[in-house]
Amino acid sequence: MKIQLLRHATTLIEFQGKRLLVDPMLSPAGEMAAIPDVSNTSNNPLVELPVEASTLCDVDALAITHLHRDHFDEAAMQLLPKELPVFCQPADAGAISRAGFLNVQPVDQELEWNGVRITRTGGQHGTGKIGQKMGPVSGFIIKVTGEPALYIAGDTIWCSEVENALQVYNPQIIICYAGEARFASGDPITMNAEDIEQVCLAAPAARIVAVHMEAWNHCVLTRSALKSFLEEKELQERVIVPDDGEFMVF
């Protein structure tokens, strides 16, 4: 299995000749408005894609964890081929279909696609009223014979849903959406460094990939800060913190 971090949560996953594009956010840098009332006032995304967006049309399917614009934006809706299979949470199927996609396959619990088993997991996109306002979010377990089991956690903090997914599915690779995204008030709505540590402790045999950093203006956890934390906790060999465009082979 080969995983390429493109930017933020957008990843390209290759296994057994298939290419799965996850959470496509394809806008040029600065194309979308900043999240208001946070210290970084730059428009989003903060950085360019490391590849030409048009090259990402050559994939076999899409997986979308939820419909916030940093995970599925207008540029992706316009550019990506409408006949591609799109795996999503049931709550988002209607909106994706209305965007013109013709092969939307909501994952209620699990489904099979060309020998690939895709299971949907839950999460908490923050706490309290903010978490409720952020709406439903999902992750996905990807299992295919001959490849390591992959868990894409999605936009979630460390919570019982994540802990349960680790216990039930025993993934060998875990993609965590870090960045410690937050608004002007309230708790983080994506994983912070301590949440990544909890994932490490709960899944001691897994390799963890931390993404979702340095591309959206309300993500405050940087790669360098996370790496320093991991070294302090002696977890640097367990967690990969890739740069945009970096390939990882498992």
Image: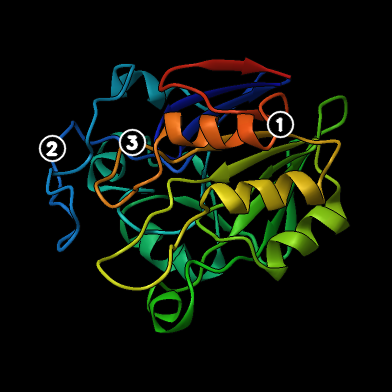
Residue beneath the point at 48% across and 56% down: 190
Residue 21 shows in the view: no
Residue 214, numbered circle: 3
* Spatial CA span between label 3 and label 2: 13 Å
Q: How many marks?
A: 3
Of residues 174 and 92, which is closer to you in this image?
174
In what quadrant of the picture does the N terminus appear? Answer: top right
Instruction: Indicate the position of residue 107 as horizontal and vertical percent values.
Output: 64, 60
Q: Judging from the image, what secondary structure is the residue with disc 3 in?
A: loop
Residue 13, numbered circle: none
Residue at the disc numbered 1: 234
Dot 2, how many residues are within 10 Å of its Cα: few (below 14), some (14-19), or many (20+)? some
Residue 30, numbered circle: 2
From this view, report whether residue 183 is shown above or below residue 191.
below
Left or right, 202 with reference to 136: right
From this view, report whether residue 161 is shown above or below residue 57.
below
Of residues 23 and 178, which is closer to you in this image?
178
Pointer 3 or 2: first along the chain = 2
Of labels 3 and 1, the one closer to you: 1
> In the figure, residue 61 lies in which quadrant?
top right
Q: Residue furthest bottom?
A: 129
Instruction: Indicate the position of residue 20 as horizontal and vertical percent values.
Output: 57, 32
From this view, report whether residue 36 is shown above or below residue 18.
below
Q: The residue under label 1 is which amino acid type? A: Glu
Pointer 3 or 1: first along the chain = 3
